[in-house]
Image (cartoon, rainbow, N blue to C red):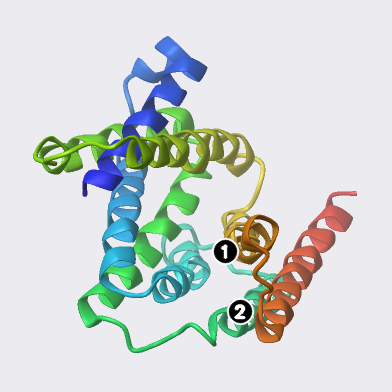
Amino acid sequence: MAIASGRSAFAAAIFLLAYRSRLFRRPSKTTWLSGLALMLTQTGFVIANKMTTAANAIMLQYISPFVIVILGVLLYHYMPTRRELVALFVATAGITLFFIDDLSAGNLIGNLIALGTGVTFAVVFLLNNRPECDTPVALFIGQVSTFLVGLPFLLTTQTYHVRPVLALATLGIFQLGLAYLLFGLGIQKTKPLSANLLAMAEPIANPIWVFWVMGEMPGTTAMVGAVIILAAVIYLNAGQLKTQR
């Protein structure tokens, strides 16, 4: 909770610098719900990442595309196209292959929390795409509420060292702050399912960074899974570009 709070403090500061007074407009109900979903996603993922394996936490969060399809049908009567369904199942097969070597039974409670973040993560994509949602305000609410929920844990931390604080600053500025600024710009122009499948590029980028920084070569199965995910995303978005033309 202290980690979630600390990094969101830096992310909220990035949003303040970018949007300033625009963030203090009266939020709609959809905007509030979107901010709450983001807070639950961020805190839930950090907790799950500590209570189960990192692979389990990420893998279970990516049930979110299926949740987007289900909620889209139930709430907004949006029926996915055949191309979207094909891309969804192919990408899911890819991310399963990507993590297959690292998956384990893990911790049951941690796995359940990670599963919950899959639902809330889907809601973040779905609501921020709605015209009645003020996306910058929703994302700012998500960061501020995450900071406040975890603040008691942050304040009771006994010692502060330079490396953990720098790590929190890096996560808050890059992983959350700048990343969600770009997310806010993109989600208004992209279908929620397409955006969520594009977000699968985040976990598959991990072994690339590890290879560049530490020289650790990813396994063959992981590389095949990464290629499958990218192929599914390209297939989906190429079809949409063709339709737009």
Query: Which residue position is annotated with label 2?
Result: 98
Instruction: Tell how many labels.
Output: 2
Question: Residue sitting at 73 percent across and 81 percent down?
Answer: 224
Question: Residue sitting at 36 percent across and 58 percent down?
Answer: 120
Q: Quadrant of residue 172?
A: top left
Label whose residue precedes the other's in the sequence (2 or 1): 2
Q: Name which residue type carries label 2.
A: Phe
Quick check: 120 left or right of 219? left
* Mark 2 vs mark 1, CA separation in Å: 9 Å
Tell me the crowding category of disc 2: few under 14, some 14 to 19, or many 20 or more residues within 10 angstroms, Cα based: many
Residue 102 place in picture, x, y as percent: 49, 82
Query: Which residue position is annotated with label 1?
Result: 203
Tell me the crowding category of disc 1: few under 14, some 14 to 19, or many 20 or more residues within 10 angstroms, Cα based: some
Residue 122 place in picture, x, y as percent: 44, 59
Can you say whether 133 is above or below 26 in the image?
A: below
Can you say whether 22 is above or below 89 in the image?
A: above
Are circles 2 and 1 on residues that touch, CB within 8 Å?
yes
Q: In which quarter of the image is residue 23?
A: top left
User: Which secondary structure lies at badge 1?
Assistant: helix
Quick check: 85 left or right of 10? right
Residue 155 place in picture, x, y as percent: 12, 35
In the orientation shown, which residue stands out farthest toward the top? Answer: 21
